[in-house]
Image (spheres, helix red, strand yellow):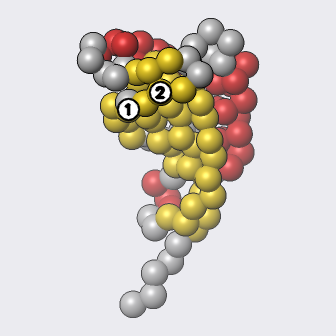
Amino acid sequence: MSMLHTRRTLLTVICEASIEARVLADARRLGAHGSTASDARGWGQHGERDGGWPMSGNVRIDILCEAAVADTIAGHLQEHYFRSYAMICYLSEVSVLRSEKF
């Protein structure tokens, strides 16, 4: 059996847990069909996030979607969140199975 796969973009957002719901609502409004969120810990320019208190931690949000949707969401996050919140975004080109889901 041969696998059929399709190119999609994986947008990964790592941000403060306190804004998770807002980021997810924005992503949905801008065309994302789904997301996966998980707790994240780390350190960087904005200090250390050890996740000891849920709202002081970070969350990692992965969104698989078409490139244009990923660009739209990333641009929105950059415009509305980067100045005020600890947030990074990166995009990766990936191959997915069941492409109709993304």
Check contact, mark 1 vs mark 2: CB within 8 A: no
Report x, y in % for residue 57.
37, 20
Q: Secondary structure at mark 1?
A: strand
Q: Which mark is residue 43?
A: 2
x 61%, y 53%: residue: 92
x 64%, y 32%: residue: 73
Given this view, does label 1 or label 2 mark the residue nearer the observer?
2
Amino acid marked by disc 1: Ala
Q: Secondary structure at mark 2?
A: strand
Using a 10 Å C-alpha cutoff, classify the residue at mark 1 as few (fewer than 14 neighbours), some (14 to 19) or many (20 or more).
Answer: some
Q: Which mark is residue 40?
A: 1
Above or below, 54 relative to 5: above
| Quadrant including the N terminus | bottom left
x 61%, y 35%: residue: 89
Report x, y in % for residue 33.
49, 41
Using a 10 Å C-alpha cutoff, classify the residue at mark 2 as few (fewer than 14 neighbours), some (14 to 19) or many (20 or more).
Answer: few
The CA span between labels 1 and 2 is: 10 Å
Residue at the far bottom: name it.
1
Q: Nearer the viewer, residue 34 or 86?
A: 86
Q: Nearer the viewer, residue 36 or 33?
A: 36
Q: Is residue 23 left or right of residue 38?
A: right
x 50%, y 31%: residue: 14
> Does residue 20 show up?
no
> Does residue 50 show up?
yes
